[in-house]
Amino acid sequence: MRKFYKSKYGFALAEMVLVIAIIVILAAVMIINVRTYISAAQSRSNRAESVRASAITNIGQCESRMATLGFEATGSITVVTPSPAGGAPSTT
């Protein structure tokens, strides 16, 4: 049987091919995982944007409904407490 030639310096061609093959396999797995994570992140971002847009729409609908009922958006909150004697409620 013939013995393989061992170089005193550097690496043999078979060793280099093996290392490159391992690097390529690891890179392929990494690329697939990164694409999956990016897709999931975009999906979550789209859902969050949808929720935000619907919340803004709901606020706009509430404001327009309040305007049709005669309320004004003053930026302050009025607390109405019932009076104990059954009279008119007081506001604070």
Image (cartoon, grey):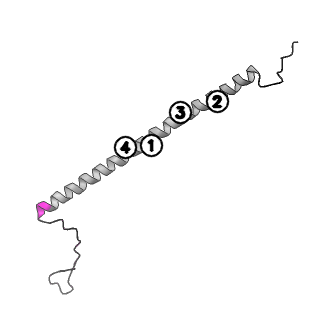
- Type of amino acid at the residue the image marks with label 3: Ile
Tell me if label 3 and label 4 are in contact, CB under 8 Å.
no
**Relative horizontal placement of residue 40, taking residue 13 as reference (left or right):** left
Residue 66, image x and y in percent? 16, 62
Marks 3 and 2 sit apart, C-alpha to C-alpha, by 14 Å
In the rendered view, would you say 28 is above or below 69?
A: above
Instruction: Looking at the image, tell me whether mark 4 or mark 2 is earlier in sequence order.
Output: 2
Q: Main secondary structure of the magenta part?
A: loop
In the rendered view, would you say 90 is above or below 39?
A: below
**Relative horizontal placement of residue 44, taking residue 55 as reference (left or right):** right
- The residue carrying mark 1 is 41
- The residue carrying mark 3 is 32
- Type of amino acid at the residue the image marks with label 4: Asn
Tell me if label 4 and label 1 are in contact, CB under 8 Å.
no
Tell me if label 3 and label 2 are in contact, CB under 8 Å.
no
- The residue carrying mark 2 is 23
